[in-house]
Amino acid sequence: MTNPSTTEKDVMAVVHEARPVVVGVDGSEDALHAARWAAALAVRLGEPLHLVHAFSDVDEALLIVTAPQQADAGAYPRELGQSVLDRAADAIHADFPTLRVRRTLRHHSPREALVELSRRARMLVLACADVSAGGALLVGSTTLAVATRAACPVIAWRGETLVPNDHPVVVGVDENRISLTALTTAFELADCLAVGLTAVYAMSPRRLPGEIDIPMVVDWEAVEDEATQRLSERLYPIADRWPDVHVTHVVQIGSPSRVILSHAEDAQLIVVGSRGRGQLASALLGSTGLGLLHHSPTPVVICPASRTEDQSIDRLVDPAAATSH
């Protein structure tokens, strides 16, 4: 048996190592814009793009009812789905002629199809319509359902920007737990986009880092300065892996979602970690993530929870706590 040629080996290696940016398209203009933005991100990451359109039995039944004039009504959803994929691919090829683009049509639940594909994806991008609290609790959305189960970061895209800009990436640091997955993702994105990173720590006045005693009269400026210094010191080992990324440390008093949202207008991406702590989608995602999905004017990156990578904020800002477990 002959060995593959060098070229074949190279191709095999590329195929094996490629972790595409997966984007779901449903025929809407928002999804098309999200796909074009995802293509620009894929180019920056040096990864291929994977366009996915999935339809369920319910979707097929509805289309058959609404399009009885079709000679083969059963084939109609497939034809429509292929048209959606082709339209998105044509727009992307016009923007990025050399980008590798794969198209996949699935007769499957969109949520299940996307969760399955997330296991082999670098990132997953979905257009995100407004998510109300009631909607999240009662019926949810594809974005919420996928974000709570995906194996890779999920980007809930919204806005008008079709290509990355020079605005910073903002990563939220929760006062209760910090996701190293979110930090790593934020640094990777800032590095590939050649922009700065703003690490935002929302500090509650009821729980200060390092078990600082609260006097009757609090010098909040001094407290914030000390917390910022500790945060900077503890993030240094992570930041040192991306020396070209300029990091700005911000400590503000308030709820995580409100503090992070105060930086959303000047950001091109907001990165947060999800954590499993309940059965409802909003609880699984966390109040911070849900608040950002509902109110953020810029895309939100939701990173999957990991027991091995999540650390308490005490261990992040208090060196002594890190050795006590």
Image (tube, rainbow, N blue to C red):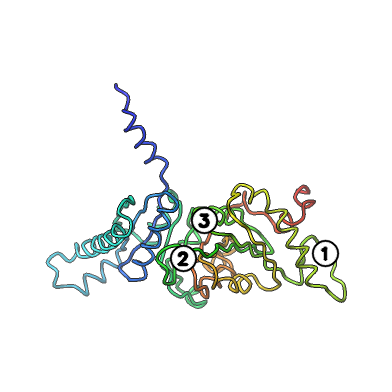
Label 3, label 2: how many angstroms apart (C-alpha)? 21 Å
Q: Dot 1 surroundings within 10 Å: few (below 14), some, or many (20 or more)?
A: few
Is 101 on the left-hand or right-hand side of 237? left
Label 3, label 1: how many angstroms apart (C-alpha)? 37 Å
- Amino acid tagged 3: Ala
Q: Which residue is mark 2?
A: 156
Mark 3 or 2, closer to the camera: 3
Q: Which residue is mark 1?
A: 212
Quarter of the view holding residue 35: bottom left
- Amino acid tagged 2: Ala
- Identify the disc placed on residue 196: none
Mark 3 or 1, closer to the camera: 3
Identify the residue at horizontal 84%, vertical 70% (top origin): 214
Is 188 on the left-hand or right-hand side of 309? left
Asked which secondary structure carries label 1, the reply is loop
Is 145 on the left-hand or right-hand side of 174? left
Percent across and percent down for residue 247 are 63, 58
Asked which secondary structure carries label 3, the reply is loop
Task: Please report contact status of discs 3 and 1: CB closer than 8 Å, yes or no.
Answer: no
- Amino acid tagged 1: Ile
- Identify the disc placed on residue 194: 3
